[in-house]
Image: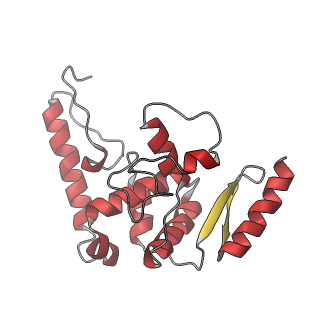
């Protein structure tokens, strides 16, 4: 609709459907969505996770969850895994960060990740870099941010996506994770 459009960085807005008067300019639209984000986070002024990580890191973590999870329940469990790993100073090891590293968000990776991919040197790759990446990997929706800010709890530290069952499989330790992953790999061969 707008003749003059600029890209809006991932961290400048919350992905949503916005309704704005068609007589407004693109700058009016930008101001509207910036204010929406500001007002959204004002709801969470005393949130424990925002106080610990800051809004920008919450958005980065939410973007990882947004790309990894399949549904609301998945978002909650994956959030808990990420928070558990951060609390234990473990690498996050998020496949979506590897895909974002390889594609730089410019195309869809149409093949499974391999071991070489996990070692791909890039600032967003959470398999080789410690802690929270420096930037978001996608726009993130309000639901995902809210789920993360609820600070969901679990004892899980690992997960993988089981394509046969069309769901993530969660484990509490690496031994259990490796066992389940090996069982899964035997089934898909």
Is the N terminus in the top left, top right, bottom left or bottom right quadrant?
Answer: top left
Residue 25, percent from left and from top: 14, 29
Tell me what residue is drawn at x 23 percent, y 73 percent: 45
Q: Is residue 123 above or below residue 108?
A: below
Task: Tally the numbered discs.
Answer: 0
In the image, residue 78 above or below residue 71: below
Q: Quadrant of residue 52?
A: bottom left
Q: Position of residue 125 (x, y in %)?
A: 46, 52
Farthest-out residue, top:
3
Q: Is residue 91 left or right of residue 188?
A: left
| Residue closest to the eye, 138 or 41 | 138
Estimate the x, y position of residue 129 in percent, counting from the top left: 43, 59
Q: Position of residue 100 (x, y in %)?
A: 46, 43
Residue closer to the observer: 120 or 104: 120
Tell me how the rendering is colored: secondary structure
Residue shown at the point (28%, 50%) measured from the top left:
11
Which is nearer the eye, 25 or 173? 173
Q: Residue at x 26, y 33 (%)?
A: 7
In the displayed structure image, the side of residue 95 where residue 58 appears, left or right: left
Query: Which residue is pictured at 22% across the width and 27% down the height?
Result: 5
**Relative height, residue 26 to residue 75 (above, below):** above
């Amino acid at each position: 609709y707008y003749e003059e459009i600029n890209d809006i960085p991932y961290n400048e807005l919350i992905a949503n459907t916005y309704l704005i008067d068609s007589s407004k300019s693109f700058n009016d639209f930008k101001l509207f969505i910036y204010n929406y984000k500001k007002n959204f986070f004002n709801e969470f002024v005393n949130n424990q996770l925002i106080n610990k990580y800051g809004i920008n890191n919450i958005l980065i973590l939410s973007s990882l969850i947004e790309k990894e999870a399949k549904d609301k329940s998945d978002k909650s469990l994956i959030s808990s895994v990420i928070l558990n790993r951060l609390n234990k100073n473990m690498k996050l090891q998020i496949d979506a960060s590897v895909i974002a590293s390889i594609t730089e968000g410019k195309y869809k990776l149409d093949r499974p990740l391999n071991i070489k991919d996990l070692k791909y040197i890039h600032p967003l790759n959470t398999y080789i870099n410690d802690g929270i990446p420096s930037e978001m990997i996608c726009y993130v929706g309000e639901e995902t941010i809210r789920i993360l800010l609820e600070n969901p709890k679990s004892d899980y530290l690992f997960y993988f996506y089981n394509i046969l069952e069309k769901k993530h499989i969660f484990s509490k330790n690496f031994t259990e994770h490796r066992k389940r992953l090996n069982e899964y790999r035997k089934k898909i061969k």
